[in-house]
Image: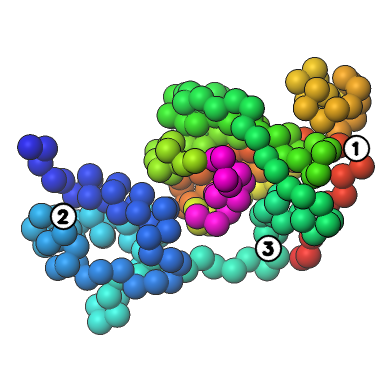
Amino acid sequence: MTAVTHSSIREDIRKRIVAGEWGLGEQMPGEIDLASEYGCSRTTMNRALRALADEGMIERKRKGGTRVRPLPLPKAQLRIPIIREQVEARGLDYSSKVIHRKRLSAKSQTHIPPGTDCIYLESLHMAGSEPFAYEKRWVNLAAVSEFEHVDLSEISANEWLVRTVPFSRGNVALAASNADAAVAEMLNVPCGNAVFTMQRNTWLESAAITAATLFFPPEYRLEFEI
């Protein structure tokens, strides 16, 4: 039987937090209860929780217990849109299809550490009978291990991640790019045509969550509040 260590407990609790078992700011079970759950000593559990607190993932107070650290509100926030909601807001029927799905090692072109086990996805989002967005996405299995087994026939990766996985920071790059053959075929535009491109990366503290590139037809309009 594999010995339970403070490192293995720390990583398992981290995965449970990322999976949303305890919401941001929510109180977690006490040290004694967690030690009993994992079958370890209270000293071992204390080391695991102290390491997570040092990383900024949880807060520990002497009389207040342990909580998932609430995220600080920046001066401006950009909510990650759920593509289904964007389509339905236009009065159109939404559907999505996974074109390609594989477990691969992360490439150096993403912010996910090279060699990290990931799920690589290519998906097509439809608005009625017309393509709305073509998506290429890497999901870090070290941070979101349960994603490997998510059924994407009823929900898109975009919506599942937005609704399930918290993130503490991210970056977005917007640009016009020329459609290569694959993008042109998916969006039903001429090869080389200019398309609206969005690159988006997210993290939970130091852990990279996902790297996504979305391609939209030239007429796509992005609106958001600041």
Image height of 218 relative to 35, above or below? above
Classify mark 2: residues with Cα within 10 Å, few (<14), some (14-19) or many (20+): few
Residue at 65% from the left image edge and 35% from the top image edge = 97
Q: Are marks 1 and 2 in contact (CB under 8 Å)?
A: no
Residue at 57% from the left image edge and 45% from the top image edge = 154
Q: Name which of mark 1 and mark 2 comes first in the sequence.
A: 2
> Could you say which quadrant of the image residue 138 lies in?
top right
Nearer mark to the viewer, of 3 and 1: 1
Element type at mark 2: helix
Where does label 1 land, which residue? 218
Element type at mark 1: loop
Report the front residue among 54 and 81. Answer: 81
Q: Name which of mark 3 and mark 2 comes first in the sequence.
A: 2
Q: Provide residue 102's location: percent of width, then percent of height.
A: 51, 25
Q: Provide residue 118's location: percent of width, then percent of height.
A: 47, 31
Where does label 3 land, which residue? 77
Where does label 2 land, which residue? 38
